Amino acid sequence: VSVTQKQLTPQITANDKCYDGNTSATLSSQTLVGVESGDDVSLVVGTASFASASPGFDILVTASGLSLGGDDAGNYVLSSLTSTATADI
C-alpha cells in the first residue's frame, strides 16, 4: 500500500511596522490550509522580511525556511517553502 502525503498551503499575515531602516518583519499569524480536523500540525517559519526597507504601503513580505511541526507532520507536505503577504512601513 502506498500512502501519499497530503499537501498543505502555508499562509502568513505580516504586521505593519515603524521605519527602522531594515527589512526584518514580524508575523501576526501563520496558518496552514488543508489540515485534517484533529491533526497536530503547525507551520514553522524560519525568517520573514520586507522586500524593501523604505517606508511605504503594501510592501511585499516573504516568509522563508518554512517547515512543518507537530505529531502528525509526517502525514503532510508543504506546497511551498515560502509564503507572502503585504504590510506597511
Image: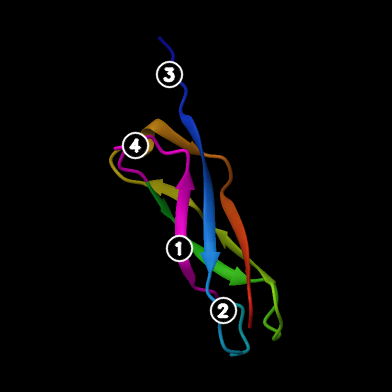
Residue at image location 52% in from the left, 74% down from the top: 15
Q: State whether residue 15 is above or below residue 63.
A: below
Quadrant in the picture for residue 22: bottom right
Q: Dot 1 lies on which element?
A: strand
Which is in the foreground here, disc 4 or disc 1?
4
Please, what is the three-letter code of the amino acid marked with disc 3?
Val
Nearest to N terminus: mark 2 or mark 4: 2
Q: Amino acid at mark 4?
A: Ser
The residue identified by callout 1 is: 29
Give the vertical position of 57 relative to 79 (above or below).
below
Q: CA distance from mark 2 to mark 3?
A: 41 Å
SS at badge 4: loop
Distance from Cα at disc 4 to Cα at disc 1: 19 Å
Measured as percent of width and height from the top left, residue 2 is found at 44, 13
Q: Confirm whether the magenta stretch covers residue 77.
A: no
Mark 1 and mark 2 lie on one chain; the one further toward the N terminus is 2
Q: Badge 4 is on which residue? A: 37
Q: Residue at x 38, y 34 (%)?
A: 36
Q: Residues within 10 Å of mark 4 (few under 14, many from 20)?
A: few
Residue under pointer 2: 16
Q: Amino acid at mark 2?
A: Asp
- From the image, which quarter does the C terminus lie in? bottom right
- Residue tagged 3: 3
